[in-house]
Image: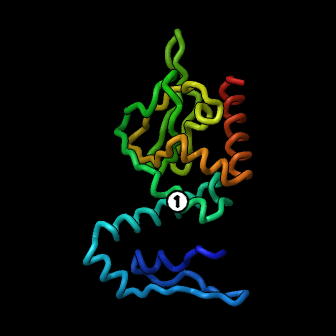
Amino acid sequence: LNPGDFLGESALLENSVRMANVRTVTPTTVLSLYRQDVDALGVKRPQIFETIKQQMEIMHFLFNIRLFADLPSVLVRSVIPKIAISRYKDGETVFKKGDEGDQFYLIQSGGVSIIDETKEGEKEVAKLGEHDYFGEIALIKNVPRAMTTRCMGDTEVLRLEKDVIFQLIEGSKLFAANINRVGETRMETVGLS
């Protein structure tokens, strides 16, 4: 952990036991927040408590996705308030081929079908599920959407605007390289390169 990082939040927010021991390796100043303070915040300001809890859940979710796993936590925390949650019903279209590519999506639950729409009809080229992501090609190449994306079952996604993705790209050379590599690989896979 580095200056500005935090620990123990899951046990406080989920009212659970600690999952690890933590030792300092250099002299460290630590600020503590006690359970009774967190409980009081939850009673006095439930909307703040829920926002904090939701943001922590989003952060933990992001760190379980390979693309985000190596990002500095301070960078991830800086974009979390800018991430929106969207819910779609079975069969609902997230975006269509040719739409402007202004958002990136991470699947929290459910799944999507990636569909190529041609004159001959629709052809499914991929299925994505929980912890997968999509929408990066249009963002990094600054082109319209190459495929249509339709939900398979009720689906919940995290939605990141273009400026958030570029904030992450500018903040991490590794993220920039990885998202470009993923986009290139997907373009080859579906025959767009």
Name the image colouring.
rainbow
Q: Is residue 62 left or right of residue 33?
A: right
Residue type for callout 1: Phe
At 60% from the left edge and 38% from the top edge, which residue is drawn? 136
Q: Residues within 10 Å of mark 1 (few under 14, many from 20)?
A: some
Q: Quarter of the image containing the C terminus?
A: top right
Q: Quarter of the image containing the N terminus?
A: bottom right
At 49% from the left edge and 57% from the top edge, which residue is drawn? 80
At 43% from the left edge and 37% from the top edge, which residue is drawn? 152
At 55% from the left edge and 57% from the top edge, which residue is drawn? 62
Q: Nearer the viewer, residue 41 or 178?
A: 41
Q: Position of residue 86 (x, y in %)?
A: 39, 45
Q: Secondary structure at mark 1?
A: helix
189 to 78, vertically: above or below: above
Q: Nearer the viewer, residue 40 or 126?
A: 40
173 to 139, vertically: above or below: below
Residue named by callout 1: 61
Q: Nearer the viewer, residue 34 or 125?
A: 34
Q: Position of residue 84 (x, y in %)?
A: 42, 49
Q: Quadrant of residue 123?
A: top right
79 to 56, vertically: above or below: above
Q: Quadrant of residue 125?
A: top right
